[in-house]
């Protein structure tokens, strides 16, 4: 189950962060802060994955696959990543369970990336600023709820 999805800009600025927990009140605030911290902590692993990849010849890997896969376990969560050629990073924090469906997760990342691209096509959408669109938020929520069901 995805408990958090985040879009992080090229300079590690949070552009969108949404949590999906059952907590309410103060517990919800604590859970949100904890998941935000997990996302931020995972950015180092994303950097190591993309920069540190070398091919068999020792040259940098020029793979076009944006899905980074499982990045790291943190507490009772698993963090998965996706990074575009423009260094836009998408991170998903999932509850640590055995039935993580990576092909479906890869599609979720791709779809959320497409939502973000469509959001930026609007000439009034600010670049490199947090996403402030109810339509975008609802589209992402629907995608996450489909994965979680």
Image (cartoon, rainbow, N blue to C red):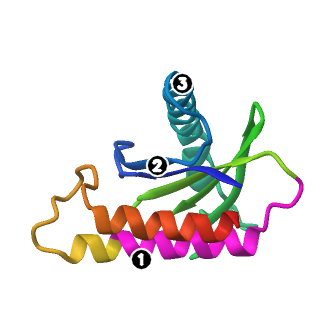
The label shown at residue 18 is: 2
Q: Earlier in the sequence, mark 1 or mark 3?
A: 3
What secondary structure characterizes most of the magenta part?
A: helix
The mark closer to the camera, 1 or 3, is 3
How packed is label 1: few (under 14 Cα within 10 Å), some, or many (20 or more)? few
Name the residue rendered at 34%, 66% in the picture: 136
> Spatial distance from mark 1 to mark 3, Cα to Cα?
30 Å
Name the residue rendered at 42%, 70% in the picture: 139
**Which residue is disc 3 drawn over?**
30
The mark closer to the camera, 1 or 2, is 2
Q: Earlier in the sequence, mark 1 or mark 2?
A: 2
Name the residue rendered at 49%, 63% in the picture: 141
How packed is label 3: few (under 14 Cα within 10 Å), some, or many (20 or more)? few
Local secondary structure at mark 3: helix
CB contact under 8 Å: marks 1 and 2: no
The magenta-colored residue range is: 98-116
Q: Quadrant of the N terminus?
A: bottom right
Local secondary structure at mark 2: strand
Image side of residue 124 versus residue 83, left or right = left
Residue 48 percent coordinates (x, y) = 60, 45
The total number of labels drawn is 3
**Which residue is disc 1 drawn over?**
114
Residue 79 percent coordinates (x, y) = 67, 47
Does 102 lie within the magenta span? Answer: yes
Residue 94 percent coordinates (x, y) = 69, 50
Q: Earlier in the sequence, mark 3 or mark 2?
A: 2
The label shown at residue 64 is: none
Residue at the extreme left of the image, as rendered = 124
Image side of residue 128 versus residue 36, left or right = left
Give the quarter of the image for residue 127.
bottom left
> Spatial distance from mark 3 to mark 2, Cα to Cα?
14 Å
Residue at the extreme right of the image, as rendered = 98
């Amino acid at each position: 189950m995805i408990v958090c999805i985040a879009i992080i800009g090229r300079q590690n600025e949070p552009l969108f962060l949404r949590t999906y927990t059952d907590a309410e009140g103060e517990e919800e605030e604590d859970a949100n802060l904890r998941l935000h911290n997990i996302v931020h902590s995972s950015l180092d692993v994303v950097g190591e994955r993309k920069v540190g990849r070398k091919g068999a010849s020792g040259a940098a890997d020029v793979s076009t696959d944006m899905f980074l896969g499982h990045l790291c376990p943190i507490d009772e969560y698993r963090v998965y990543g996706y990074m575009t050629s423009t260094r836009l990073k998408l991170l998903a924090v999932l509850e640590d369970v055995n039935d993580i469906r990576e092909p479906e997760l890869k599609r979720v990342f791709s779809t959320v990336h497409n939502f973000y691209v469509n959001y930026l096509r609007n000439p009034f959408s600010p670049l490199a600023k947090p996403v402030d669109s109810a339509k975008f938020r609802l589209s992402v929520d629907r995608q996450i709820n489909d994965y979680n069901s």
